[in-house]
Amino acid sequence: MKDLGTKELMTKHLILKVPTMKEQKKLYDILMIPEVNKYYLSINKKYKNNLLSWENQKQFYENKITTALSKDRYEWSVFLKETGECIGQINAHNRNDLSNDIKDVGWYIEPKYQGNGYASEAARAMLNYMFYEVGISGIITSAAILNVASWRIMEKLGFVREKDTKFNEYTFVDESVESYVYKINSEQYTKYNN
């Protein structure tokens, strides 16, 4: 695996860009839409009230931008090519329970743009980069069973659903949420997507 960091990626309809502060307020606004954050945010519940104000979160986003160009960070702001509008975010990130060459992934798209295939398009571009250029060996991730759109994207891209489920804690959901666990390795991804 090579630590190459985030680089701009282009697809048919989208530009995946290195995050800048310019679009962070828009991404925050999208993330605060209940149907977006419900099965995305997994920040400790004790910080939930801090999330509800841009003024409380602005420093967090500024700190995030200062590390956006680090060679071990893989996070993109997703823009529509046609209009230049920021419509979401996608990332491949480390987890404490996984080796550095195995990532977790996450994405969200503004609801008014969902259903157009943009999440799949962005995910494919990000996965191509992570597997073919960065050289990760695999991805282990999960999606709430009730979040059908998210796990359908994983299956569309060749991820394999594990037999056992797990329970995730989401910031804005009171109870634990049963989730499917998905895995894909480099060989599976290459075979499925060629």
Image (cartoon, helix red, strand yellow):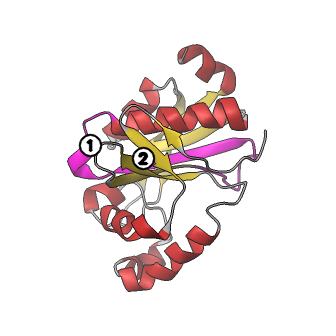
Q: Which residue is mark 2?
A: 178
Crowding around mark 1 (Cα neighbors within 10 Å: few <14, some 14 to 19, many 20+) is few
Helix, strand or loop status at disc 1: loop
What range is drawn magenta here?
92-117
Q: Earlier in the sequence, mark 1 or mark 2?
A: 1
| 39 sits to left or right of 99 | left
The residues tagged by marks 1 and 2 sit, at their Cα atoms, a distance apart of 23 Å
| Dot label at residue 101 | none
Give the quarter of the image for residue 63. bottom right
Of residues 176 and 21, the one nearer the viewer is: 21
Q: In the picture shown, does residue 4 fall above or below 70?
A: above
Q: Disc 1 residue type? A: Gln
Q: In the picture shown, does residue 2 fall above or below 171?
A: above
| 163 sits to left or right of 14 | right
Q: In the picture shown, does residue 126 fall above or below 69?
A: above
Residue 105 lies within the magenta run: yes
Give the position of the N terminus as an image quadrant.
top right
Q: Can residue 83 be seen from the camera position used here?
A: yes
Q: Disc 2 residue type? A: Glu
Residue at image location 46% in from the left, 32% down from the top: 154
Helix, strand or loop status at disc 2: strand
Residue at image location 39% in from the left, 85% down from the top: 55
Residue at image location 70% in from the left, 60% down from the top: 70
Q: Which residue is mark 1?
A: 114
Give the quarter of the image for residue 148. top left
Estimate the x, y position of residue 43 in percent, counting from the top left.
49, 68
| 17 sits to left or right of 6 | left
Estimate the x, y position of residue 132 in percent, counting from the top left.
67, 29
